[in-house]
Amino acid sequence: MPRITANALDIHYERTGRGPRLLFISGTGGDLRVRPNMLDGPFARSFDLVAYDQRGLGQTEKPDRPYAMADYADDAAGLMDALGWEDALVIGVSFGGMVAQNLVVRHPQRVRRLVLACTSPGGDGGASYPFHEIGHLKGEARARHLLPINDTRLDEAWAAAHPERYAEAIAQSAADPFAGEPGREMGARRQIEARAGHDVWEALPAVRIPAMIAAGRFDAIAPAQSQLNLALALRGSVLRFFEGGHMFMLQDRTAVPAMIDFLLEDSSGPAS
């Protein structure tokens, strides 16, 4: 089991593939034990890909103290240090996109090219859905609440017209194969608390690297206006909307190839 000490934290990571170095930063609750994941997909065929469990999650250390977005960004930079990576291409999805934004703001020389998927800048640029306000919802109740927010097409009318698919979606979303593990609830809660404080809006215009903002047309977790704001703040960035909700990378087969093409435009990028 690959583990490494970075930013005074014991981090579980996995590495696969060959090509330019790519750091993948996962979303809320990300756990590399849940398969398949990005390590099993097209990214590994084009890049030297590293993904990791963030602090408080999965098999990474779970210190019981408040977390800040700066901690997550410094964890990513520390992981790169421990791997011997001076810089890398970076993709951040959802919460991982928030971490990636903090990473490029705090450590601008470490990121060569950036993909931000279904995320938000915070502050006056717009926040993603406030998960910290629904901490009381658990299991199926939480899944039922979030389904039409994840994808606005999956509303009450859709649920009534497709009862079997609705039940399957709720069961899949509510399942947690690692529930009850020591520190799991605490670490997840600490992540949500840190997420509520995400705000890099005023710092983003100083970022001077190629960036792609990718989003789902029917995603109410990362609203369309936040994507437009990100594109305005990151000068010269590329904005692409895909057919899907918050999970558009799985719903629209053109999304991941478009991200790969964008990242590979960095022809001078570091090889593995």
Image (cartoon, rainbow, N blue to C red):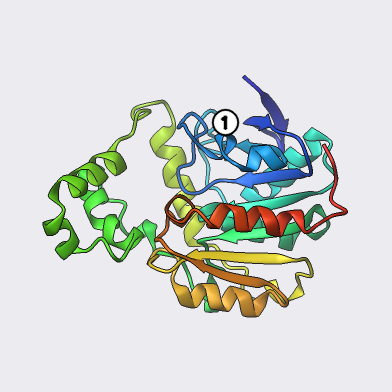
Residue in front for this viewpoint, 82 or 157:
157
Residue at position x 72%, y 45% from top? 22
| Left or right relative to 58: residue 244 | left
Q: Residue furthest top?
A: 1
| Left or right relative to 152: residue 84 | right
Q: Residue 33, how many percent across, how many down?
A: 48, 28
Residue in front for this viewpoint, 13 or 185:
13
Can residue 147 be seen in the rendering of this structure?
yes
| Relative height, residue 2 to residue 203 (above, below) | above
Residue at position x 50%, y 65% from top? 215
| Left or right relative to 230: residue 80 | right
Residue at position x 46%, y 39% from top? 187
Please give the count of numbered marks on the rendered protein.
1
Residue at position x 28%, y 65% from top? 153
Q: Which residue is mark 1?
A: 61
Which corner quadrant of the image does residue 265 belong to? bottom right
Can residue 99 be seen in the rendering of this structure?
no
The 10 Å Cα crowd at callout 1, few under 14, some 14 to 19, many 20 or more, is: some
Q: Considering the image in quadrants, where does the N terminus appear?
A: top right
Residue in front for this viewpoint, 219 or 257:
257
Q: Residue 90, how many percent across, how many down?
A: 69, 52
Q: Residue furthest right?
A: 268
| Relative height, residue 61 to residue 25 (above, below) | above
Which corner quadrant of the image does residue 208 belong to? bottom right
Q: Considering the image in quadrants, where does the C terminus appear?
A: top right
Which amino acid type corresponds to the residue marked 1 in the rendered image?
Glu
Q: Residue 186, how many percent across, how many down?
A: 42, 38
Q: Secondary structure at mark 1?
A: loop
